[in-house]
Amino acid sequence: MRVIAGAFKGRRLIAPKGNRDVRPTADRVKESVFSIVREQIIDANFLDLCAGTGNIGIEALSRGAKHVTFLERDPRCIQIIKQNLRTCGLVAGPQARHSLLRRDAVKGISYLQKQDAAFEIIYFDPPYGTDLASIPELYTTCLALFAENSLLRTSGTLLVEHAKRFVVPDKVGNLTRSRQAAYGDTVVSFYHKSL
């Protein structure tokens, strides 16, 4: 796993060993998705939801995002994200271009809403590699929350990574799926707010 392009191009990132719930986004998926949203990344506030290794958020920073919020519940993953950020020379502090929150997805979305956070791009990638019965419900719950709140800016893009076997809705409230890109068993659905 590596940073594909930008300021940290070529940096090798690590993933936790033996953790089947963590499934970093493949480089070919990441490269394709970032090519699609490349103009939108520059100076964007970016949310990496269910961040895992931080792979996606670090790619966003490398390509010019203004700030990335990494949201992850697993303490082992939090340590991996910190290590990957250090690998890229991204350190914590008042001038940092990133923040790291340890919360599950639903509580994290509610917390960020209370903080009046807003993002141009949100990447939502729950651990769908396992056969957890709760995962389809997590997609439904989080999509409904995004439709109800103002975390996604009006002109923003919500990217939802999921397995082909998970059917995500075409429309949830004011969110409409405008595009899908398939990469083997991985699908990325692009949502925008209806005006």
Image (cartoon, rainbow, N blue to C red):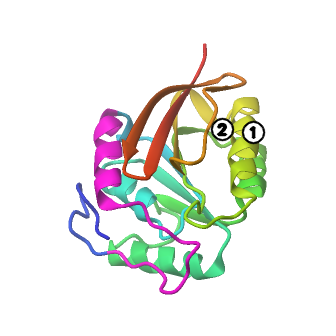
Instruction: Label 1: state its secondary structure.
Output: helix
Residue at 35% across, 40% down: 42
Disc 1 marks a residue whose amino acid type is Leu
Does residue 34 belong to the magenta stretch? yes
**Above or below 117: residue 180:** above
Residue 7 relative to residue 50: left or right: left
Residue hosting label 2: 151
In this view, the residue farthest toward the top is: 195
- Mark 2 packing: few (<14 Cα in 10 Å), some, or many (20+)? many
Front-most of residues 173 and 131: 131
Q: Quadrant of residue 131?
A: bottom right
- The x and y percentages for residue 27 are 30, 60
Tell me the amino acid under the disc marked 2: Leu
> Which quarter shows the N terminus?
bottom left
* Foreground residue among 44 and 20: 20
Q: Residue furthest bottom?
A: 18
Q: Which mark is residue 145?
A: 1
Q: Which residue is rendered at x = 50% and y = 37% of the image?
A: 189
Query: Where in the figure is residue 125, as x and y percent of width and height?
Result: 55, 54
Residue 15 counted in the magenta span: yes
Q: CA distance from mark 2 to mark 1?
A: 9 Å
Q: Is residue 93 visible?
A: yes
Q: Is residue 74 above or below residue 170?
A: below
Magenta-tinted stretch: 13-39
In primary-sequence order, the first of circles 2 and 1 is 1
Q: How many marks?
A: 2
Return the x and y of residue 151 as percentages of the image width and height: 65, 38
The residue at the point 28 percent across, 75 percent down is 12
Q: Are marks 2 and 1 in contact (CB under 8 Å)?
A: yes
Label 1: how many residues lie within 10 Å, few (<14), some (14-19) or many (20+)? some
Image quadrant in which you'd find residue 103: bottom right
Which residue is pictured at 41% across the width and 75% down the height? 84
